[in-house]
């Protein structure tokens, strides 16, 4: 499982002009079955993604393809998590590669 923090960067002011492309990128992550949760870091600090289902190299390429990353609206920091304990609904994360 991966947790990625998308923290606003030097080009934050350009976010509104790239938002549609960023939202399309998010929708593709869900459609591909990789993104489990996407949300905002509060208060207004950026975003967070919880993901699983692909290897680190492919996931890093996916993150690099985010228009917000490419336009330096955010910086991405990804952490890989080996889930040991979960609520029952998230048990699938314990066996995910």
Image: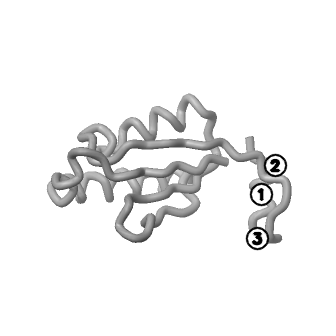
The disc at residue 92 is: 1
**Left or right: 94 as drawn, with respect to 11:** right
- State yes or no: discs 3 and 2 in contact (Cβ < 8 Å): no
Q: Earlier in the sequence, mark 3 or mark 2?
A: 3
Q: Taking 69 as reference, is 31 above or below it? A: below
Residue 7 spot, x, y in % from top left: 39, 51
Q: Taking 65 as reference, is 33 above or below it? A: below
Q: Residue at x 27, y 41 (%)?
A: 72
Q: Quadrant of the C terminus?
A: top right
Task: Give the labeled residue for mark 2.
Answer: 95
Q: Kindly report the distance in space between the C-alpha atoms of the residues bearing marks 1 and 3.
A: 8 Å
- State yes or no: discs 2 and 1 in contact (Cβ < 8 Å): yes
Q: Secondary structure at mark 1?
A: helix
Task: Give the labeled residue for mark 3.
Answer: 89
Q: Which quarter of the figure has residue 86?
A: bottom right
Q: Secondary structure at mark 3?
A: helix
Q: How is the image coloured?
A: one colour
**Left or right: 56 as drawn, with respect to 82:** left
Q: Taking 68 as reference, is 86 above or below it? A: below
Q: Kindly report the distance in space between the C-alpha atoms of the residues bearing marks 3 and 2.
A: 13 Å
- State yes or no: discs 1 and 3 in contact (Cβ < 8 Å): no
Q: Secondary structure at mark 2?
A: loop
Q: Residue at x 60, y 33 (%)?
A: 56
Residue 38 spot, x, y in % from top left: 48, 62
């Amino acid at each position: 499982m991966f947790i990625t923090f998308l923290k606003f960067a030097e080009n934050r002011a350009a976010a509104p002009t790239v938002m549609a492309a960023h939202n399309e990128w998010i929708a593709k992550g869900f459609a591909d079955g990789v993104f489990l949760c996407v949300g905002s870091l509060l208060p207004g600090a950026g975003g967070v993604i919880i993901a699983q289902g692909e290897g680190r190299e492919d996931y890093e390429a996916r993150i690099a393809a985010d228009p917000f990353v490419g336009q330096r609206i955010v910086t991405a920091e990804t952490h890989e998590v080996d889930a040991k304990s979960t609520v029952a609904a998230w048990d699938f994360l314990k066996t995910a590669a």
